[in-house]
Image: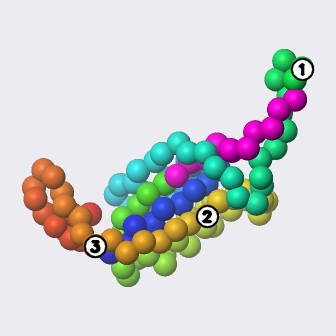
């Protein structure tokens, strides 16, 4: 099993969610995050005062999938989150040792 963690732009969340749902993904976790990469932040003006925003707001999506679907899910997230501009985000793929469904005690892929 794999845990796919994608950091994307806020306004792409609904498009990514719909694409994943259409592909049969039954659940995901969405977290509001802040960070920076190559963008390095930007300047904003608030009440006439200019200040630097060093951490940009993003959304982190986490999806647990069977090994054989990992590449497909990564492709879906990539194509639906891409704008072609700097700051589109990153996808991280982790090996997932085990999953336990709390309600039933099911383990592994049955718990997904």
Q: Which of 27 and 3 is in front in this view?
A: 3
Q: Where is residue 104 in the image (x, y as percent from the top left)?
A: 10, 55
Mark 3 vs mark 1: which is more N-terminal? 1
Pick the quarter of the image with the C terminus. bottom left
**Closer to us: mark 2 or mark 1?**
1
Which residue, as the protein is rendered here, is positioned at the far top?
47
Q: Position of residue 43 (x, y in %)?
A: 84, 38
Disc ID at residue 90: 2
Q: How far apart are marks 3 and 2 (CA)?
A: 22 Å
Q: Write the start and end of the magenta stretch as one range.
A: 50-60
Judge left or right: residue 109 versus residue 81: left
Judge left or right: residue 78 versus residue 67: right
Mark 2 vs mark 1: which is more N-terminal? 1
Disc ID at residue 48: 1
Tell me what residue is drawn at x 64 percent, y 43 percent.
Answer: 57
- Mark yes or no: residue 66 visible: no
Pick the quarter of the image with the N terminus. bottom left
Are dots 2 and 1 in contact, CB under 8 Å?
A: no
Residue 33 in which image quadrant: top right
Q: Is residue 36 above or below residue 75?
A: above
Query: Element at badge 1?
Result: loop
Q: Position of residue 76 (x, y in %)?
A: 54, 68
Give the main secondary structure, helix, strand or loop, of the magenta stretch. Answer: strand
**According to the image, label 3 marks what residue?**
97
Q: How far apart are marks 2 and 1 (CA)?
A: 34 Å
Mark 3 vs mark 2: which is more N-terminal? 2
């Amino acid at each position: 099993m794999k845990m796919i963690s994608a950091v994307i732009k806020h306004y792409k969340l609904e498009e990514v969610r719909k694409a994943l749902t259409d592909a049969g993904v039954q659940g995901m976790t969405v977290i509001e995050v802040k960070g920076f990469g190559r963008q390095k932040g930007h300047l904003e003006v608030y009440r006439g005062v200019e200040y630097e925003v060093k951490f940009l707001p993003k959304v982190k999506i986490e999806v647990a999938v069977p090994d054989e679907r990992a590449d497909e899910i990564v492709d879906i997230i990539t194509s639906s989150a891409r704008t072609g501009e700097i700051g589109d985000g990153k996808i991280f793929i982790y090996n997932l040792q085990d999953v336990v469904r709390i309600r039933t005690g099911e383990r592994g892929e049955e718990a997904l």
